[in-house]
Structures are given as C-alpha cells and as structure tokens.
Amino acid sequence: CEFRNNTATETGRDLPPGGAIGNWALNSVSTISESIFCGNQPAAISPPGSWEDSGQNLFSDICEEDLPGETPPFLRGDSNGDAVLDVSDAITTLGFLFLGDNSPACRAAADSNADGNFDISDAIFVLNFLFLGGEAFPSPTECSISEQRSDLSLGCENSSCQ
C-alpha cells in the first residue's frame, strides 16, 4: 500500500492523530508490511504501539515525487545570500533559529555542514571554519547546482549566485 500526503487534525480523543492510519480500536494491533508512508502529518500511524511492523515498510517526511528535480545554483554556507562566506552567515542562521528572523531564502545553502538539517550545528560549522581552521564546506563550494536529496528537501527559493 502507499499512503502519501495525508493530514489528520484531530481524533476527538486524547490521542494524537495519524495522518495515514488512525487505529482507535482498544487492544487492536494492525500488522503492516511492504507499504510506503510519505508526507503524512502529523504522524503516519497513530497511536504508537497500535501496529506491528512486518518488514519492508518505508517512512519519509517528504514524498520523492514532491521534490523538485534540482535546486537553483547556490554556495554552501551562504545563509544570508550575499555570495560571500563570512561571520554574517552564522549570525543570519542564529537570528533565524533564536530570534525569529526570516528564514534564509536558500535553506539548502544555510545547511553549512550538508547534514540535511538547518540547525545550530550549521552556525557552529561556519564559525569553526572561519576562526579555527575547521573542515571545508561540502559541495557546492562554488555557485553551482546540488542534486543531494537533503538539499532538495530543504529547498532553495532564491539564491544570490548565478
């Protein structure tokens, strides 16, 4: 079975909703195998413990076909979109994460360490590179296109490099 991009907002009970499957029968356990669950919110199956994994199930927050084919060209680490790698990129990241500043237009570029997450480790990566001689930025290190799945997931609406 394939369960794609389903959303549940409430259950009418004190249990979290399942975007794809909500199993609300008491003491009932569903057996699920060889199924794809992607893009289901807030969870694929709810409540936890109401199902048994018989194998070969695939879970993902984003469905593969919902991703763009590629990002526009960007420079890894350039959080503020000025085509320069400097301390202002770390400040832009920290401002978004802790002060409620606007999200970078190219979140893939802001993922400085290319781990697929936009978080505090990206600001630390930039500062470590700039001031302590840390690891070099993962590609793209020049204005170019990335086809890494994690970059596609984060997105890049607008990049200053061309």
Image (spheres, grey):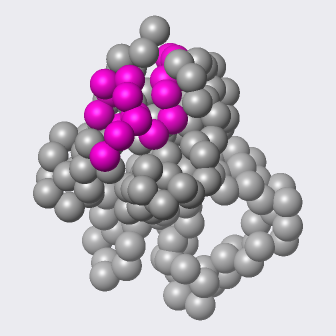
The residue depicted at 77 percent of the width and 59 percent of the height is: 57
Left or right, residue 117 beside residue 81: right
Task: Compare residues 54 and 102 and report the one nearer the observer.
Answer: 102
Q: Quadrant of residue 92?
A: top left
Left or right, residue 94 beside residue 78: left
Q: Residue furthest top?
A: 162
Q: Which residues are magenta?
A: 71-87
Q: Position of residue 104 (x, y in %)?
A: 30, 36
Q: Position of residue 140 (x, y in %)?
A: 60, 29
Left or right, residue 138 beside residue 85: right
The residue depicted at 64 percent of the width and 34 percent of the height is: 139
The residue depicted at 71 percent of the width and 49 percent of the height is: 36
Does residue 63 show up?
A: no
Q: Is residue 96 magenta?
A: no
Q: Position of residue 137 (x, y in %)?
A: 58, 43
The residue depicted at 15 percent of the width and 53 percent of the height is: 100
State whether residue 153 is above or below residue 21: above
Q: Is residue 85 magenta?
A: yes
Q: Position of residue 134 (x, y in %)?
A: 56, 57
Q: Quadrant of residue 151?
A: top right
